[in-house]
Image (cartoon, helix red, strand yellow):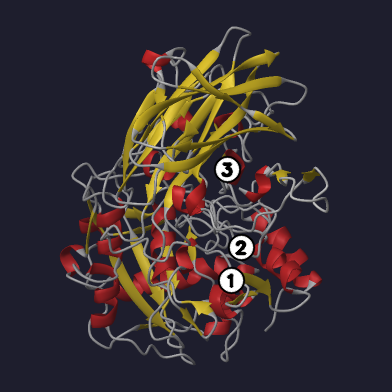
Amino acid sequence: MIFFTSRNFLLFSITFFSWIHISLAAPPNPYNFYQYNPEQDQFLPRSSKSHAEFHQALQGCCETRRTSILQADGTEYVLGIKIDFPDQPGQRSSAEFDQYLFSDTGISLKTYYREVSYGKMNIESGPMKGIVPKGNQWVRAKKKMGYYGQGKISPKLYLELLVEACQGVDPFVDFSEYDRNGDGVVDHVFLIHAGDDEASTSTGAFGDNIWSILLRPVNKMFDGVLVESAVVVAEEPSFDHPHLGIYFHEFFHDLGAPDVYGSTMVDQRDHKWGLMGMFGPYQGDLVNGLGNGLNPSHIIGYLKWDFDANPDNGRLGWLEPITLRKNTSGLEVPNFELNDIVFKIDVPSKNEYFLIENRFRQSGAIYDQKLPESGILIWHIDETQVRPSYSVDAADQIWLEDPSDPDHQDYRNITAGAAFSTDDNETSFTPSTAPNSNTEDGSTTGISITNISHEGEIMTIDVWFGDTYEPNNNLSSAYKIELNQSYESFISATNDVDFYRMDIVEPNFIIIELSNIPENLGYQLSLQNQEGLEIKKGDRTGDTRLIGYRVKSARALYIVVESQNGFDQYDAYRLQVKNAESTSSLLVLDHIKVYPNPCYGFDPVIFNYVIPSRNL
């Protein structure tokens, strides 16, 4: 495997800044640098140098169309052209590429954009009825493949290849027929070259392969219209199928979309969860250690709403988020794959907000089946940091809240545990959880998302602004809770009292635990009956309060949390009620007091013990 040397990388950097609009676009295939270890369920560097080499390969990525476009009727014509080389003849037929781009079924550019747009985008081959030249014919480039492969150092070579391809089909293609909206610009040119993609192979047997890119600006006239940009992707004969996720990734660049992976592997923003992320376009089965790219991830909701992630020029996309402005309990969140529904929670007085998606691998959709897991994704969007005009990466304004790795430091797992759900016991996102709902600068928002349900086609969540579950300050307004769920709330004033109702349906022994009490504060836990009479007070065990109680018949019980000493409207306490009889963990005794001395006569022996919360 060959990587940039310091010398040619410096040359590339100089060339990149002198020809800023033509550069690499596909992310380097991370599977070339990291390999999956099934025993540890992690991605590990292939060698001690892999991490640094990946960073180097990533430098200078990528390009995007400067203006987002969308045809008024949703139909996008794509002019597909094949070109091969004297030393690398094309091997796949036009019929194969027609399948990859225009098929109504299976994995194709057409089915991908039909699904992610919720039927609002229709990819068509236009008047040519498929890719050209037809059959097994290819436009033949003037020079060997390695010559054009140096385009990563001298980008004008990519442009040279594209011009040769367009000239090769110009005698029988009317480019003006691919300007559907009459703006004088060809809508989409899709150039497929023979040979492999350097993003997945580094370099090939015939010299330097060509890196998949969005090429712009082209600024060449054919039939009176301008070819302003072109997608350039590879035939990839070394693989059973091309990495079609890269085809889809580059096409979204041609709609104006940026990348979402930044300049380093650590601290990546969407990893496997989005088409424009690091692993997203390569999602699929692992073949010889490489993701085959045949089941790429959906485009994240933020980019489905605003293709170019730039609110300054308006929003152009396929969906409009639903803004939540008041406390909402039991909010239904349908799966993101088949429903154009994303919820938005604005941060007060800030140009920041949270977007909420329900990602579900078993939704019945064609794509998103290879996600790391299912559940609620919470995206923190900070539009005070909108990418500058010269940048093609929006990572600085997008952050995926990850309960398994809040600071995004574990590149081995690639945000694999970012989805919230009861299945993972990740049911709350509040000012005091990790991660928390604070702003980018650390200010408390008071926003809480709690009671996150099990994975499913429709998930439910509770959304709160400030104190949660209010009003719940007496028996009649008590908030109903369930066994084995976590509930986070706040004591927001000295006289704030929180009531919770639990309906016990059969005899049971329950343990009520109040934990995460803010430091240096005293909260009291108690249990009441339906008449408001106190049944039991909580015992203090370390920094928690515990009540153990045997319920002998079906009844309603009321749990009360109140202040004994101080309050905190920003740091939440956590309340859980567990079925002790179904708990199978090993019992460890903190304290044992035996009296009187059991060695004497037949005096009774009494054990008084305290169960630490960690053993419940």
Mark toward the start of the polypeptide (1 vs 3): 1
Q: CA distance from mark 1 to mark 2?
A: 8 Å
The answer to which image quadrant residue 553 occupies is top left
Residue 322, position as x, y percentages in the image: 34, 30
Q: CA distance from mark 2 to mark 3?
A: 16 Å
Q: Residue furthest top?
A: 495
Tag 1: amino acid = Asp
Tag 3: amino acid = Trp
Q: Which mark is residue 399?
A: 3
What residue would you read off at disc 1?
41
Q: On the picture, is 215 further left or further right than 587?
A: left
When the figure is inspected, residue 14 is found, relative to residue 160, above or below; the finding is above
Front-most of residues 243 and 456: 456
Q: Residues within 10 Å of mark 2 (few under 14, many from 20)?
A: some
Tag 2: amino acid = Asn
Dots 1, 2 in contact, CB < 8 A: yes
